[in-house]
């Protein structure tokens, strides 16, 4: 058993290295193959920036990079960027984006560069630190981490568990949410909360955490993304004593006060020390700095000795010697204050973490030095179906029990390396398959109209989901969207009462997909024109741009649609919309060919995510003759013909 476990861990380490190399290689390849202008066109770089120091925050320097030309980029707050003077491959200077405006990007860095911040380039950057943390955790796997793998490999059997009575803080919880919390509270090892789209997974977890805290337990709460952690902070802030660990630049602005960095920075004693430090730096900078060309080989001790005797030496005047000595004396005081600040901050951080009832972090940030040595009674992981096993083992190695929440019927983690594809099978999915009795389904969805729910419910959840009364019959008409007054075709497509629409392109000779030279992706110009017209007509009847999301599985189609649609209409791949929702979703399936090839549309989890983002209206554009080669797509089109609105071009 021991040997098999060690072999499994070694295999995981190998897979992590393969994925790390694939991600870094893809980034470097793009940087070397594409010009800066081409990378900027893709949204992965910003050129021609001028930077200036914009202050300090939470121990980081802030640099604001700006230019006159508007900045249109994928780079946003929380992203790591590589900062260079034109050739990113020659730079190792990185920072984290704090803020983005139309003509500026503010970046937090741990040091200021020696070179001038003129004509600077920023590149979206892949850091290998997350992979290093995963590997280090696997190499030094704790007994708790090993126990997780024993469950996974079938070497240990989990306890049966029981339902535990509790008095909910949130009185609005439905029966399935209460049942999941009750069973999670009564589990001695682990429990799985299966939360499909719109079923209040985060709300359920927040209540569970509050119940554990009420029982005197210390809880670690994590998720793969900062956004999911923020959602949990939002629900728990003010009702439990919590602290959020991680880079403050990656936290939503209104939640910054929950961060460890903010709580340390706002400590009165630390603030006084920092004020003293600033004052000393200001005083020191009035004197001549003893750089090598000025000190002429004299050590600090010699300079202080000559200055004390009121002497000059080696061509350095008596007055300049005194200035150099003053600089050295004040600099020593500065170093002493800096050391005191570091010691005080470290002590305060441990005190805050000790006193916190709940610590929140991304999976990766649990490996930060500040959390070293901390153990938890229970670990709660949201988005567990989007975390690889090496990633989720980082938080699970810190707790006696764990609760995972997710939905294995939606998209798994994205894995770039073909050789590491097995990483896409998550711990959540494998435990669900092995120990289904240790799980509970949240079965009431609060997102979408009942008709929009019906097909994915039937296809992916065995018809077990129910639409709550508050959303069962919602349409765009509830938002004062007018009836369509176009021709018969467009009235059928746009009308608020037609909640589910499929536009079939099979009768058009110009329906076929295309492939750009050198690209592995696909685009479809007919579908792009249709989607553009759909959006224009939706806006005409009173739909707001920010209510509309456009989903398409192929990156080239994303680029094409992005160039055609108004700014506030979000266009993303399926992955980009996971965990999101909009009042209206328009889907362009792209694939249309005589061979009946649908490529990675074969992954039905993509279909599930695509179909479950819309709240009040879903419009799908596709070629039924190509899509129907797959039985699920064929069933979907027949479902629309039977219960929705089917229109053919």
Image (tube, rainbow, N blue to C red):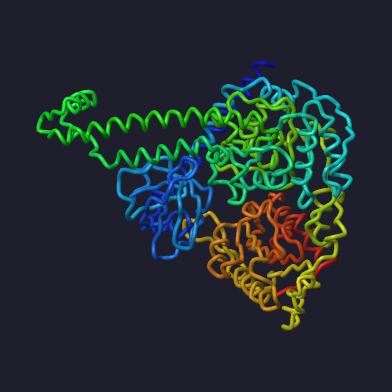
Q: Does any portion of residue 134 appear in the rendered image?
A: no
Q: Is residue 589 left or right of residue 105?
A: right
Query: Hey, which quadrant is residue 638 in on the image?
Result: bottom right
Residue ID at (48%, 57%): 43
Q: Is residue 146 above or below residue 22?
A: above
Q: Is residue 474 left or right of residue 90?
A: right
**Horizontal and vertical percent position of residue 568:** 59, 66
Query: Hey, which quadrant is residue 613 in on the image?
Result: bottom right
Q: Is residue 109 above or below residue 495?
A: above
Front residue of 244/302: it is 302
Q: Is residue 113 left or right of residue 312?
A: right
Q: Is residue 357 above or below residue 416?
A: above
Work out which quarter of the rendered image holds the N terminus and state it: top right
Front residue of 166/315: it is 315
**Horizontal and vertical percent position of residue 273:** 46, 35
Return the residue found at the far top.
2
Residue ID at (13%, 28%): 311
**Horizontal and vertical percent position of residue 280:** 36, 38
Residue ID at (65%, 46%): 230
Work out which quarter of the rendered image holds the C terminus and state it: bottom right
Query: Hey, which quadrant is residue 634 in on the image?
Result: bottom right
């Amino acid at each position: 058993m021991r040997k098999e476990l060690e072999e499994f861990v070694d295999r995981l380490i190998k897979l992590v290295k393969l994925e790390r190399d694939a991600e870094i290689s893809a980034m470097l390849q793009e940087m070397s193959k594409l010009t800066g202008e081409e990378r900027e066109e893709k949204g992965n770089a910003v050129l021609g920036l001028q930077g200036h120091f914009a202050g300090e925050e939470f121990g980081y320097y802030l640099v604001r990079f700006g230019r006159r030309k508007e900045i249109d980029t994928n780079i946003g707050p929380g992203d790591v960027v590589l900062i260079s003077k034109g050739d990113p491959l020659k730079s190792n200077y990185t920072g984290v984006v704090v803020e983005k405006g139309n003509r500026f990007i503010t970046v937090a860095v741990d040091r200021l560069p020696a070179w001038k911040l003129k004509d600077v380039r920023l590149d979206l950057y892949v850091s290998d630190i997350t992979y290093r943390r995963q590997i280090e955790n696997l190499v030094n796997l704790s007994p708790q981490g090993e126990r997780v793998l024993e469950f996974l490999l079938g070497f240990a059997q989990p306890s049966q568990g029981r339902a535990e009575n509790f008095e909910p803080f949130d009185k609005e919880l439905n029966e399935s949410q209460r049942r999941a919390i009750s069973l999670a509270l009564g589990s001695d090892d682990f429990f799985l909360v299966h939360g499909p789209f719109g079923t209040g997974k985060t709300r359920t977890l927040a209540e569970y955490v509050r119940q554990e805290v009420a029982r005197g337990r210390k809880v670690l709460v994590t998720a793969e993304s900062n956004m999911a952690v923020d959602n949990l902070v939002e629900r728990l802030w003010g009702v439990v004593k919590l602290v959020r660990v991680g880079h403050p630049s990656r936290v939503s602005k209104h939640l910054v006060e929950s961060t460890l960095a903010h709580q340390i920075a706002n400590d009165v004693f630390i603030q006084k020390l920092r004020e003293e430090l600033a004052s000393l730096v200001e005083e020191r900078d009035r004197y001549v700095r003893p750089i090598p060309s000025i000190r002429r080989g004299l050590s600090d001790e010699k300079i202080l000795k000559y200055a004390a005797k009121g002497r000059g030496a080696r061509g350095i005047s008596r007055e300049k010697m005194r200035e150099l000595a003053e600089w050295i004396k004040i600099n020593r005081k500065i170093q002493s204050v800096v050391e005191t600040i570091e010691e005080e901050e470290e002590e305060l951080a441990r005190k805050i973490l000790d006193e916190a009832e709940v610590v929140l972090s991304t999976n990766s940030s649990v490996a930060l030095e500040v959390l070293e040595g901390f153990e938890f009674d229970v670990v709660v992981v949201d988005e567990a179906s989007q975390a690889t096993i090496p990633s989720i083992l980082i938080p699970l190695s810190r707790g006696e029990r764990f609760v995972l929440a997710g939905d294995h019927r939606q998209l798994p983690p994205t894995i770039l390396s073909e050789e590491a594809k097995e990483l896409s099978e998550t711990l959540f999915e494998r435990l669900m398959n092995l120990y289904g009795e240790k799980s509970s389904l949240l079965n009431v969805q609060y997102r979408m109209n009942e008709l929009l729910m019906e097909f994915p419910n039937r296809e992916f959840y065995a018809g077990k989901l129910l639409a709550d009364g508050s959303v069962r019959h919602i349409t765009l008409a509830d938002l004062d969207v007018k009836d369509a007054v176009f021709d018969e075709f467009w009235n059928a497509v746009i009308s608020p009462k037609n909640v589910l629409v499929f536009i079939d392109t099979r009768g058009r000779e110009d329906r076929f997909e295309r492939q750009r030279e050198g690209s592995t992706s696909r685009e479809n110009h007919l579908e792009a024109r249709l989607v553009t017209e759909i959006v224009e007509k939706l806006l005409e009847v009173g739909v707001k741009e920010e209510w509309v999301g456009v989903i398409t599985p192929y990156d080239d189609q994303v680029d094409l649609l992005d160039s055609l649609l108004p700014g506030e209409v979000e266009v993303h791949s399926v992955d980009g919309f996971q965990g999101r929702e909009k009042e209206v979703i328009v889907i362009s399936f792209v694939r249309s060919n005589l061979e009946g090839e649908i490529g990675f549309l074969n992954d039905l989890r993509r279909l599930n995510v695509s179909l479950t983002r819309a709240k009040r209206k879903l419009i799908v554009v596709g070629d039924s003759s190509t899509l129907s080669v797959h039985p699920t797509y064929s069933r979907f089109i027949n479902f629309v013909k039977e219960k929705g609105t089917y229109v053919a071009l």
